[in-house]
Image (spheres, rainbow, N blue to C red):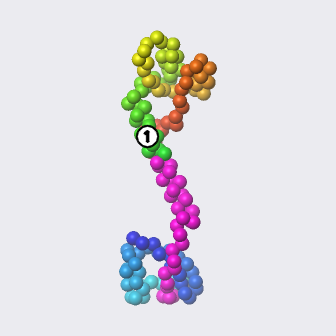
Amino acid sequence: MIKYLLNCKNCSLEFESWFASSKEFDKLKKLKLLSCQQCNSQKIEKSLMKPNLANSTFKQDKAYKNYKNVKKKLREYQKFVKENFEYVGENFAYEARSIHYSKKKNKKNIFGKASIEDVKELKEEGIETSTIPWIEDKEN
Ligand SMILES: [Zn+2]
């Protein structure tokens, strides 16, 4: 599929239309199957396509793609965390402290939920935590 910007020589309306190929455009034109959406004139010419970079649809597409990519990255990260960290849920602050103060050499990795206050308190105690954005599995 190819999108052309068409230009009516009669009323100078510009409109976009999709064609299977550039050949199809020529064929339809020859068969006088192309007509202006406004004045029905068949004096339709192909205009040069406006560069896509300048129009807002592109920006939206790009933003959407970025959003999708970020989500994908987050999901990969979450997968990594789930595989390598033990989920402690609401007990995160408690578990983080017990790991921090334990004498064990092999300290486990944990992840879970903590409030901003929890994180602040942990930090004051010298326990560094990372906060990552989390996507619930239900969300698409
Ligand atoms: Zn026209």
For the image shown, how many numbered marks are present on the structure?
A: 1
Q: How many neighbours does mark 1 have within 10 angstroms: few (below 14), some (14-19), or many (20 or more)?
A: some
Residue pointed to by mark 1: 75
Name the residue: 54% across, 31% down.
131
- The amino acid pointed to by label 1 is Arg
- The answer to whether the beta carbon of the residue marked 1 is less than 8 Å from any atom of ligand 1 is no
Q: Is residue 37 visible?
A: no
Give x and y (percent) for residue 115: 58, 26
Name the residue: 50% across, 49% down.
67
Name the residue: 55% across, 59% down.
59
Give x and y (percent) for residue 123: 59, 22
Q: Quadrant of the N terminus?
A: bottom left
64 is within the stretch colored magenta: yes
State whether residue 35 is above or below residue 115.
below
Q: Is residue 47 visible?
A: yes
The magenta segment is: 41-69
Give x and y (percent) for residue 9: 55, 87
